[in-house]
Amino acid sequence: MGNRILKIIIWIFIVMLPTILICQEAGKQEAPIVLRNADSMFGYPTANGSVREFNGNVVLTQGNVTVRSDKAIHYMDLNIADLTGNVIITQSDMVLKAPHINYNGNTRIAVSDGGVELKDKEITLFADFGKYSTETLIADFEKNVTMLDGKSTLKAKFGKYSRKTEIADFDENVIVEDDSATITAKKVTFDRNNRNSFAYGNVVVKGKFSNVILTGDTVINLSKDRYTKAYGKPVLYQIDTIKTVELSSTFNESQPFLTDSGEVVKYEFDTLSISSDTMEAYRNLDAEIYIFTNNVEMNKGNSAAIAQFSIYMKQDEVINLMGKPIVWYDSTQLHADSISISIPERKLRAILAYGDALAATRDDSININRINQITGEDIRINIEQDTIRKIESYGNAKSLYFSSGTDSDEGAARNSSDSIIIDFDLGKVYSILWLGGIQGEYFPLIMFEADPLKIFLPNFRWSDKKPKKREMPK
């Protein structure tokens, strides 16, 4: 009995197998393109199967996709439609327009090579060439790609947008512009869900209403958090304009800023640049803070600095340097555990050094080892009109000063006190004041002429690794 039932089951399976295979094969085929309307139609056989041509108010559908055009050629066996004249494809909220589209019902891909426009909710995409998949909901556009998204405009040679994820990827000659900044890069990924952007390759960010430019290999911007992070030797440039006035007795067309009183007004640029391995920016409503980490380099006018870590508080107009910082100003350099640079109204006014501070000045270009020095727990340098006016040292202060003149007057004075104040006039030392617990000694030239280093202060440091000015991107 059991063997007989088994034979019946095997016989039924053998008989039904072709039917099963046919059903499986049929399940693999895509739904056919269906005609819903046309003013006229005629058909004819070809080597590729039956063909139907539709003219006037053509409407075709496939699932949730509707296609309208002036004319269509439907390759029935291939399940492909070639559409021309005011072609419009709709799918839910998406509208795709083009003068000509080839639509493959098997791959569900629409291709346009004569200009294409895609609208989906708040965004609009334009390009010379485009592909759109009604299955994956991905638009893949090329040549003169433009995406409009509210107040943002993205342009590139290549652009891809997913309606599912609402993420746009743009590649080659990318330009992103909104009401606050313009970004250029090799590649940009933009997430419409949170307005975050990721830019890669020669990135340049220019603020429209600020004097700040940011460059780097990679720049990440988290819009809602008001946070930006840059990698790959990022550089922050802050451009300041300086007005100078000259007198002129004659008018010259090449002097467009000539005033009625005969003054020629010229504008020069004083740029602050800060670079590092990594940069972070926090932009709140009441504060704008930039953090630079590892291999920090700074330049502004005739000053420069290096450090391992720096914080620039833009509203407070202060730059803090940590991690073996060094600041150069003209022929003077400053060393300390930490250094703070004050730039009120974006003009360098003071440099403050905290902890094991040293200010060293090389004035003698012939005897380069005769370096004037001042040390202390803290040192403050005051600057006016781009010139050092005063150096103050507090806490276990020491100084070494080389005097010059005739051979008999040459020598060096080394002194210590609680504090030291040095005043300058026209860049030269005008007076030195020692206060509290004063001790000193004098060295005639014969004692140090062969080797000035032997009378240097104990914690003397010097560096010739002054960073060079960086060229600002055009």
Image (tube, helix red, strand yellow):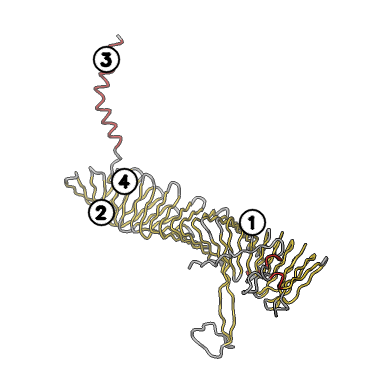
Circle 4: residue type: Thr
Circle 2: residue type: Lys
- For label 4, count other residues whose C-alpha is less than 10 Å away and answer few (under 14), some (14-19) or many (20+): some
Q: Which residue is mark 3?
A: 7
Q: Which residue is mark 2?
A: 71
Query: Relative to 442, is 107 above or below?
Result: above
Whether tag 4 and tag 1 are in contact, CB under 8 A, the answer is: no
Q: Which residue is mark 1?
A: 323
Q: Which mark is residue 61?
A: 4
Q: Is residue 204 visible?
A: yes
State which tag comes first along the sequence, 1 or 2. 2
Q: Locate the N terminus by quadrant.
A: top left
Q: Residue furthest top?
A: 1
Instruction: Give x and y (percent) for residue 445.
Output: 71, 73
Query: Could you say whether the residue bearing mark 3 is in a helix, strand or loop?
Result: helix
Instruction: Give x and y (percent) for residue 6.
Output: 29, 14
Q: Quadrant of residue 344?
A: bottom right
Alpha carbons under labels 3 and 4: distance apart: 48 Å
Alpha carbons under labels 2 and 4: distance apart: 14 Å
Which residue is at a point 56% across and 90% down the rendered structure image? Answer: 249
Instruction: Return the residue nearer the eye: 151 or 262.
Output: 262
Alpha carbons under labels 4 and 1: distance apart: 68 Å
- For label 3, count other residues whose C-alpha is less than 10 Å away and answer few (under 14), some (14-19) or many (20+): few
